[in-house]
Image: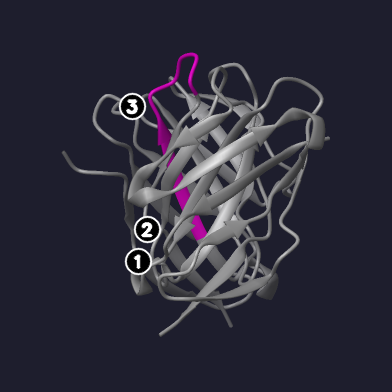
Amino acid sequence: DAGVTQSPTHLIKTRGQHVTLRCSPISGHKSVSWYQQVLGQGPQFIFQYYEKEERGRGNFPDRFSARQFPNYSSELNVNALLLGDSALYLCASTLAGPENIQYFGAGTRLSVL
Amino acid sequence: AQSVTQPDIHITVSEGASLELRCNYSYGATPYLFWYVQSPGQGLQLLLKYFSGDTLVQGIKGFEAEFKRSQSSFNLRKPSVHWSDAAEYFCAVGPYSGGGADGLTFGKGTHLIIQP
């Protein structure tokens, strides 16, 4: 079975632009979470979506938004990019239920110049 | 608010030696605890998890961790490390209930270096 897949793997943008990152969860998983990992730090929670609805949001500005599609894939959008948005963006999928085990993709490396 | 502290930024261990990575957490309820490993350029791979029950949990690749509620700790151990264990290790805490609306809270990670 395929794991969590993310695209693209690398992306270079300039300040002020917007970006869309994509994630396909493990087959059968209905929940997707997004994390930002700045170099040298642990991942920070951005969003969680379950059954196409936002279930949780971390401490990120409104420039960050996401959505989940009927096939449970997800997009993370970031508007008005800042240099500080440069990071590895990780997507995790969860089967949901009593055990909250999150399985992570390899991430998208975003560089903002 | 929950938090995770990994006091060691870097640890160097000789191949074949034992390993212990420290993790302390702060959480207002019964936590779910996790250890993940990240190799360069890779995502996070789950090593092991603690939800309830036996406080000593076994994971993949020969790793184990012990939950000590009195010390708010969840230290990761391995009796004999291999060069392939060199990576970044993250401890994380999550909410008890499913759905994970608050997401996981991660520590800053411990970079493990293996000496030949």
Q: Does the magenta stretch include residue A112?
A: no
Give the mark toward the camera: 1 or 3: 3
Q: Do the residues labelled 1 and 2 touch (CB within 8 Å)?
A: yes
Report which residue position mark 1 lands on. Answer: A9
Per the image, label 3 sits on a secondary structure element best described as loop
Mark 2 neighbour class, 10 Å CA radius: few under 14, some 14 to 19, many 20 or more: many
Amino acid type of the residue tagged 1 in the rendering:
Thr
Disc 3: CA contacts within 10 A as few (<14), some (14-19) or many (>=20):
many
Element assignment for label 1:
loop
**Label 1 environment density (alpha carbons within 10 Å; few <14, some 14–19, many ≥20):** some
Label 2: chain letter: A
Q: Which of marks 1 and 2 is nearer the N terminus?
A: 1
Count of numbered circles in the view: 3
Q: In this view, does A1 lie above or below A99?
A: below
Badge 1 and badge 3 both on one subunit: yes
Q: Extreme left residue here?
A: A1
The front one of B62 and B10 is: B62
Asked which quadrant contains residue B15, the reply is bottom left
Tell me the residue at 36%/69% (across/down).
B82
The three-letter amino acid code for the residue at tag 2 is Ala
Query: Where in the figure is residue B13, as x and y percent of width and height?
Result: 53, 74
Given the image, what chain letter belongs to the residue carrying mark 3?
Answer: A
Q: Name the residue under label 3.
A: A29
Q: Where is residue B116 in the image (x, y as percent from the top left)?
A: 40, 85
- Which residue in the structure is indicated by mark 2? A106
- Asked if residue A62 is positioned above or below residue B52 in the image, the reply reads below
Q: Give the range drawn in magenta.
A: A89-99
Q: Is mark 2 on a helix, strand or loop?
A: loop
